[in-house]
Amino acid sequence: MRVELENLTKRWGTVVGADAMNLDIKDGEFVAFLGPSGCGKTTTLLMVAGIYKPTDGDIRFDDKLVNRVAPKDRNIGMVFQSYALYPHMTVFKNISYPLKLQKVPMDAMQKRAQRVADMMGIGHLMDRKPAQLSGGQQQRVALGRALVKEPGLLLFDEPLSNLDARLRLSMRGEIKRLQMELGITSIYVTHDQIEAMTMADRIAVMMDGKLQAYDTPDELYDRPRTMFIGGFVGNPPMNFVEVEVVKSNGNFHARREGFDALVSPDRGAKAAGKGKVFLGIRPEDVTLADKGVSGEAYMVEPLGRDDLVEAQIGDIRVHVLTDPKLGIKIGDALKLDFNAEKIQFFDPETEQSLLW
Amino acid sequence: MSSTSQTATTALPSETSKMSGNIIAVAGAVAALVGFFLPWVGFIKNGALVASLSGVRVGASPVVELAGGNVLYRGSPAAYLVPIVAVIVIGLSLYAIFMRQQVAEGDGFVKIGLSLITLLVLWGQFARAQGVAERMGVELQLQYGLIMVLLALTAMIVAGVLDIRVAMAGNPAFRNVLNALSFMSPATFMVTIFFFIPVVLLLALSLTDLASSNFSDPWTFIGLENYRRMFSDRFFPRILANTIFYVVVTLGVFNVGMALVLALLTNHIPRRASFIFRLLWLLPRITPSVIYIVMWQRFVQVPPHGIINQFLGWFGVEHQPYWLNETPWLFVILVNGLVGASFGMIIFTSAIEAIPKDMITAAKVDGASAWQIIRDITMPMLRWPLLFVTSYQTLSLLVSFEYIMLLTNGGPGLYTTEVWALTSYKRALGTYFGSNQWGYGAAWGFVLVTIGAILSIVYLRVFRFDDLVQEPKIDVL
């Protein structure tokens, strides 16, 4: 099912939940709505589900306007953070409830519910009540209930947020795989950028009710259009340094007091002569070298595979990912090399990228 | 004392308190002995006929006849209890002290229990003895004896508590039981004070002929005579049928049915409006009963006062009767139901609002219509409030009568709208044919209490109360 949001807006009085969202989702695509709390992602999702009525704008499913279609007639399945299972019904009754409402005959209903439950690995729990299940099992039941009627569109509202870290990791993979196998168009609301990056075909980044960017994870990561995206996508987050870009001896340099990094010509040219700009660089694109910007290890956080070093350079600090084997300690003198091909530049006023 | 040679070397803390418990018990026993015999002194000194707390009495009395030499007051077998209990308490103390090795955890409870029973019996006997002395014009000097006895009993209770503490230290299972009991004790206390004791008193009262015509000579035990009289009353079937009709219809149509409809409706309108609506609906409940009924009586009056009739007049309806005589039951049920519905409405509303929003969203997405959501999601989740409102309101309707009394007083005519509780009230307390028949009224009341208790149990079974208590969740990956 193809989904199109056109100028979609939701207001309560003066409070704006979603502001003129424009978005199209291809058939079979997995799209994540990513943003901090209160950014409008759930509001948008609930409008797609038909729970909220849009104040303005249109929602189209396969070119059909559905603004006034009731949730029950939209052919959607939904999974909630709270699972929202019916506590008085058994697992079987929970999963088969959408089929019961469609008046599917009992034996067909049983077959379909059992098939979905087996697929979710909870086929042996059909007679249990939700309260007798663990969090992970409950979320599988919720998924099964959303899938059983073979919906055209699956809506996920932070479905993994209530699970513990390990379980979240494995469920993440399972949901992604399931979605690919079934090819159901999906919208996945999350505030966890790793979830969005790993699962989604495209990510809609939202802030303050506005759509900030809508692109593939790689594009968002490599070519952030705004400082917000640069800072929000990726972990540990991007470093921002206020610099001035100058050309000397045919090379572009990003400079500030005690800081001088070489910039690739195509990038440097776009930021040169603009006065003060923000340089953005990801911690993994800064490496320790024999020569480069001098600094001192202000803080070292061992992450296992890497050490996250916070380097003091003059009056600023920059996060750097280093090899734990180097055994950097607090107070060590460092030489930092900034990858000239990965440096981003942002306008300090508009916070827009100067590159993309 | 406990007397093995080990005590000399190491006295465990528990041993010490057990010992002090026994010392206190000895002191208690001595005080009890002194206390039981002291009252004799008071009586002898006054040169009157001698009665004592132990129930022994010598001589002749104009009021109290001698019977078997040991009867304080005729018709009072309780008098025998005092010496018996005294012997048991003293005997037990001695047993507890000298045969400690054989005494188990129970001995603390026995001490406390017997002390309390003794206390109750003694209290009754003391009051009785004082009454007798007063009638005989004798001054009763039992105070010192009584104080000694109370001291003894207190000592016994303290000794009992100490014994229990010792037992607790030695037996974890016993401690668990005691912990459970202590968690239950506030509720047990309340239920005992406000239910069990009144019910026992009611039952006792219903077996006597206590009435305003004969209450100079109370507590004459007449067995089940009151019950025989009640069940053979000519209007008994009528009152029974009235009560069932009244409770079932009011409960079903208003207290549960209408309450549920109101709760569901107000849940679908804006919050502020529904709040105001519910507030208005609560008004009659906080209106004094008499004013509320006077308002209703204005409604149903004959022209030109009656509001209903005036209203009918506008539409040219000729038939303008005194509506309370025309359809008494309609108004009895309306008057009670309109007030009663507000209780369920409040309970159901908060229960509906407590259902997570996600669950309703999930049902909508699953394809449920508004009616299907009510039927499949809301209603099953209201099972507990439904049980609560149904059973609570059944019980309160069974015993409610003040609106009926004020509105129709059981009329019009004979027993048309008379319900059980109203009958009980009229027999026991209403100035009815000039007689307050407390005993007889208590019999009606006791049957009503019994019916209520049975109904509560039935409700708990029907609604499968055990299932409503959520099982502990064991989280496994």
Image (cartoon, coloured by chain):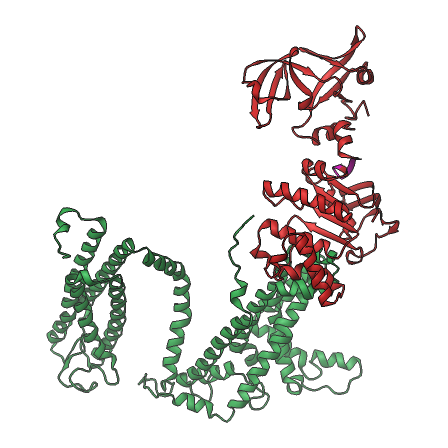
Task: Give whichever of A103, B309 is nearer the camera.
Answer: A103
Q: Is residue B106 above or below residue A64?
A: below
The residue positioned farthest toward the top in the image shown = A249
**According to the colouring, which chain is green?**
B
**Residue found 79% across the figure and 10% down from its top:** A251
Q: Is residue A213 magenta?
A: yes
Indicate the position of residue B472 as horizontal and vertical percent values.
51, 56
Q: Is residue B79 above or below residue A330?
A: below
**Residue found 40% across the figure and 88% down from its top:** B226
Quarter occupied by residue B140: bottom left
Quarter occupied by residue B279: bottom right
Describe residue B286's horizontal placement relative to residue A348 as left or right: left
Q: Is residue A195 visible?
A: yes
Principal secondary structure, stretch drawn in magenta: strand
**Residue found 61% across the figure and 69% down from its top:** B284
Q: Colour of chain A?
A: red
The residue positioned farthest toward the right in the image shown = A63
**Residue found 79% across the figure and 28% down from its top:** A225
Residue numbers of the magenta segment: A205-214
Q: Is residue A143 above or below residue B433?
A: above
Describe residue A316's horizontal placement relative to residue B148 as left or right: right
Indicate the position of residue B457 as horizontal and vertical percent values.
49, 73
Q: How many marks?
A: 0
Indicate the position of residue B107 as horizontal and vertical percent values.
24, 63
Q: Is residue B189 magenta?
A: no
Indicate the position of residue B403 as horizontal and vertical percent values.
57, 77
Query: Can you say which quadrant of the picture contains the N terminus of chain B?
Result: bottom left
Q: Is residue A69 above or below residue B46?
A: above
